[in-house]
Image (cartoon, grey):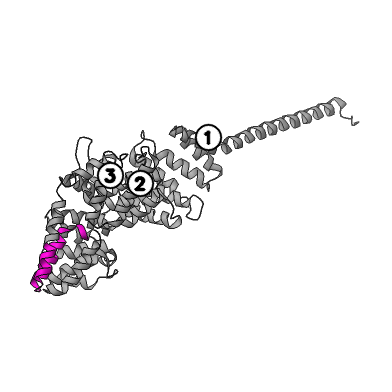
Amino acid sequence: MVDLPMPEVTTTASAVQIRRRRFLLGLAVTIVVCLGGGAVQWLITGLQTAQEALHRRDFKRARRAAERYLWIAPGSSTARIVAGNAYFQDDSLNPMVAADNAIRHFSQVPDDSLEGPVARLLEGRVVFLVRQEPAHAERLLRRSIELNPHQFDAHYLLWQVYNMTERFFDSEPMFREAYRLCPPEQRAYRLREWYSSQFTPLSAASQIDLMMGFRVETEVPSEEVALRRLSAFHEYEPTEPDTAAALAQWHLRNESRETALQVLDAVPDRAQARRSRFFHATYIETLIEVGQTQRATEEFSQWTGPKEGYQYYRIAGIHTQEILGQPANAVPLLRKAAEIWPGPSDWLLLNRLARCLALSGQKQASQQIQAEAKRIEGMTDLTFHQSVRQAFSQLENPEGLEPVVRFYDSFQRTWEAEEWRSIIAGLKKEGSPQKVLEASD
């Protein structure tokens, strides 16, 4: 049998098929590359799209674009900030769901990144305003300030956390920094807020109480509103010493002392809790109020904080008078407390000092302090504050602000008096109304 050669036509057909396959494969690769390049470009432009959408308050689009961008750049702090804000600012979402997602993004921004200080501030804002966890928020805000001490918003919000947790007496450093950093045209407004914090603390947080749902529009600030707020904080942070102390302070002020003690006794880690001067002073005072003198003495002996400041001198004076029965030794402690704000406005403290002076035989000094206590008590009457409040209703009028200066002079509060004098002088010099901007926080 003779082997016949393969027909040429078969070889030619195979070559055509190979070329066709190569062409189709090349075309497919080209299509994939083109589509892939477009997809990459689509992802890359996601950050810009997200930023523009957030600016337009198109929060849904901003979230989608930012999270799309995070597929290819999960470490982008800017995208995390945009995504977090797009959740937090969207009122159409469930508040807790929005807060959880916002925190998920903010918390992934490293402290040492350029956006670190802002991320901690934004995270603290969400934790406080939505989750209603003041102690947790305070830690985040303090970290933000540590990373960048020149942020007005961080100092301002930290001051408000103090205002809303019964620590008005200890909030001046935060306010002073917020005031220093705020724009000059806002300073009269901020000083007006500071007056509320000093003299009408129940109304100092009225707008934030409204925003956080603790009061309704038609409701005036009251002890009931404060109790709602402090109870909510304690519900969300039952083991936090400062949160418990804030609620206990309300109960002390409203003469439910046993309830105050129950709240404080429920804090599990007592050794850790004692590191908070606010908690420890409140605990000692509560024990004294309920007559548990031995426990009060034991707690006082374990004071670990600085032995200075209004809080320490006040509780040390009370302990020395009430428990040790040494009014003469209580006098210097109470005097020091009376010199530190809010001591000059604390007429109850001044009355206690007057009693200790009388019991230690210093009759004339006692009468002088008692007269001052009576004068200060009279200044707590709302009619006394009427001229100040009237002045606050027309912050553009320099002459109308003079009563505010006289008011602070009467308390020997030089700093506030001088700041108001400076504002008055600025108004007179400019010859035009000062713009007092409403808070935009």
> Residue flagged by tag 1: what amino acid is it?
Thr
Tag 2 or tag 3, which sits nearer the N-term? Answer: 3
Q: Position of residue 374 (x, y in %)?
A: 11, 57
Q: CA distance from mark 1 to mark 2?
A: 48 Å
Magenta range is: 343-370
Q: Is residue 93 above or below residue 254?
A: above
Between 328 and 386, the one lying in front of the other is: 386
Is disc 1 in contact with disc 3, using a CB cutoff of under 8 Å?
A: no
Between 34 and 65, the one lying in front of the other is: 65
> Residue flagged by tag 2: what amino acid is it?
Ala
Q: Is residue 74 left or right of residue 383?
A: right
Q: Which residue is mark 2?
A: 425
Tag 2 or tag 1, which sits nearer the N-term? Answer: 1
Q: Is residue 169 left or right of residue 127?
A: left
Residue mark closest to the camera, 1 vs 3: 3
Q: Quadrant of residue 337?
A: bottom left
Q: Position of residue 334 (x, y in %)?
A: 18, 67
Residue 49 numbered tag? 1
Q: Which residue is mark 3?
A: 401
Q: Is residue 128 left or right of residue 372?
A: right
Q: Position of residue 146 (x, y in %)?
A: 43, 58
Q: Which residue is rendered at x = 53% and y = 39% of the image?
A: 47
